[in-house]
Image (spheres, rainbow, N blue to C red):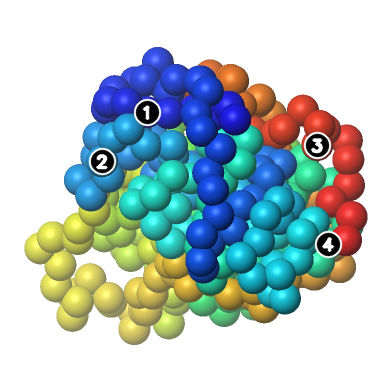
Amino acid sequence: MKAVVVHEAGGPEKLVHQEVPLPEIREGWSLVKVMGFGINHSEIFTREGKSPSVKFPRILGIECVGIVERSSDEEKLPLGQKVVSIMGEMGRAFDGSYAEYALLPDDQIYPVHTNLPWSQLAAIPETYYTAFGSMKNLRIQASDQVLVRGATSGVGVAFAKLVKAQFPDIRIYGSTRKAEKGERLKEAGFTDYVEDRNGILETEETFDKILELIGPATIKDSLSHIREAGIVCSTGQLGGKWYLEDFDPIMELKHNSYLTTFHSSDVSGEKLNELLAYIEGKGVAVEPERVFTLEEVAKAHAFLQSQDSFGKVIVLDPSAAGEHASE
């Protein structure tokens, strides 16, 4: 089969499209025909050698959508079953989705029920699952004024779409380091944008709820913009800082505010199907921003790291283009 392999840490050019052996199934593992997958910032960090536990060579990819090709548990995972897989140690401790086929543990292969085309389904798993979980943890109400910190990311745009689908008139703002992306945020459904310069929001505005996707690098500044009894949900780490240092909860959590988080490792088939039902039931537009092929994965990484990056980037099997992921 064809796969994209990283043999050593480095830039996008280290993603090598090559022939590799087709994995053989074993007890507790099944083979999935990969129809598509999203490109994620964590995969960029791994490619750059910033995930110490990952040993090269490795096929990256922490998510995929596809069809069961060979099964070690045909009762749970019958041949031809439409499935989603995300997280676990996929693409880290064992080879992931940057391939035509992926051998995955049965307990992290989730049967799903949806009529969305593969191009849309491939944009959903990690990105929309993370956005959906964050939205629920923020306990958003129609009267809230909301800020998304790091709004031009895939999760940021997905979050806005999910929230607006339930609360069409809600005021939701997005932060961006580049003012020229502000109009694109408004086109994506944001009420307006706020410039973020060197980790400081260029506004005196305050918010009831803040989705923090930059992470520890900007949490303190976000907390300074929260209203009485407001909630900050720290979900992303786009700022490249992993830990929150010199944090005094008594001083930082002023205005009786709350700090929570969401981690997409909390996965179940029920929750994934709840998300898909929400998207289909409310007509959420989940089209990806850019679509690449497997042999273009290096270009996809370069785009995601570029100044032009916006929204969700996916890789799609050519046979899946325009096809529906029918049950």
User: Which x, y percent locates residue 113?
Assistant: 81, 66
Disc 2 versus disc 1: distance between alpha carbons? 10 Å
Describe the element under mark 1 as helix, strand or loop.
strand
Q: Nearer the viewer, mark 2 or mark 3?
A: 2
Q: Residues within 10 Å of mark 2 (few under 14, many from 20)?
A: some
What's the residue type where badge 2 is placed?
Lys
Of callouts 2 and 3, the N-terminal one: 2
Q: Nearer the viewer, mark 4 or mark 2?
A: 2
- Can you identify the residue that label 4 sits on? 114
- Can you identify the residue that label 1 sits on? 6
User: Which x, y percent locates residue 30?
Assistant: 59, 58
- Badge 3 vs badge 1, beta-carbon distance below 8 Å: no
Q: Residues within 10 Å of mark 4 (few under 14, many from 20)?
A: some
What's the residue type where badge 1 is placed?
Val
User: Which x, y percent locates residue 320?
Assistant: 80, 36
Q: Taking 118 as reference, is 304 above or below it?
A: above
Task: Work out whether residue 240 or residue 81 is closer to the camera in this orientation and state it.
Answer: 81
What's the residue type where badge 3 is placed?
Ala
Disc 4 versus disc 1: distance between alpha carbons? 33 Å
Of callouts 2 and 1, the N-terminal one: 1
Of callouts 4 and 3, the N-terminal one: 4
